[in-house]
Image (spheres, rainbow, N blue to C red):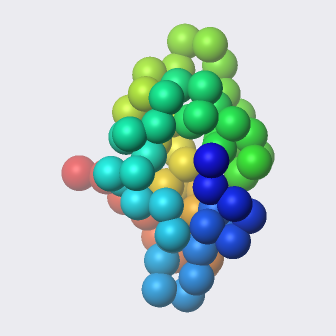
Amino acid sequence: MPDYEELNGTADGPEIGVAELREMSPAELRATAAELDVETIAADRRDDLVDRILQRQSERLGQDYGTG
C-alpha cells in the first residue's frame, strides 16, 4: 500500500502511476481511494477506480487530468 507522500505526489506528477494502480487488488484500490477521499461504490469497475484515483492525485497537484 502506498504511503502518504506517494499518494499526494510531487510537482512533477502523481507518484502512483497507472501501471502500479492496475497491479493492485480491488481491496488495495479501494483503500487507496479512501486515503484520497475518492468516493467508491461496490459496483465500481477497476478501471473506473484507477481513473478516479489518478484524477484526484492530479487535482491535488493543481493539474488537469483527462482520459482519451
Horizontal side of 36 relative to 9 (left or right) equals right
**Is residue 34 something one can see in this rendering?**
yes
Residue positioned most to the top:
43
Q: Which residue is drawn at 44% across and 22% down?
A: 45
Q: Where is residue 63 in the image (x, y as percent from the top left)?
A: 51, 76
Q: Which residue is drawn at 47% across and 86% down?
A: 12
10 is higher (above) or lower (below) than 43: below
Horizontal side of 3 relative to 61 (left or right) equals right
Q: Residue at x 33, y 51 (%)?
A: 19
Q: Which residue is drawn at 58% across and 82% down?
A: 10
Q: Where is residue 24 in the image (x, y as percent from the top left)?
A: 47, 37
3 is higher (above) or lower (below) than 60: above
Residue positioned most to the left:
68
**Is residue 60 something one can see in this rendering?**
no
Which quadrant of the view contains residue 11?
Answer: bottom right
Residue positioned most to the bottom:
11
Q: Position of residue 21 (x, y in %)?
A: 44, 46
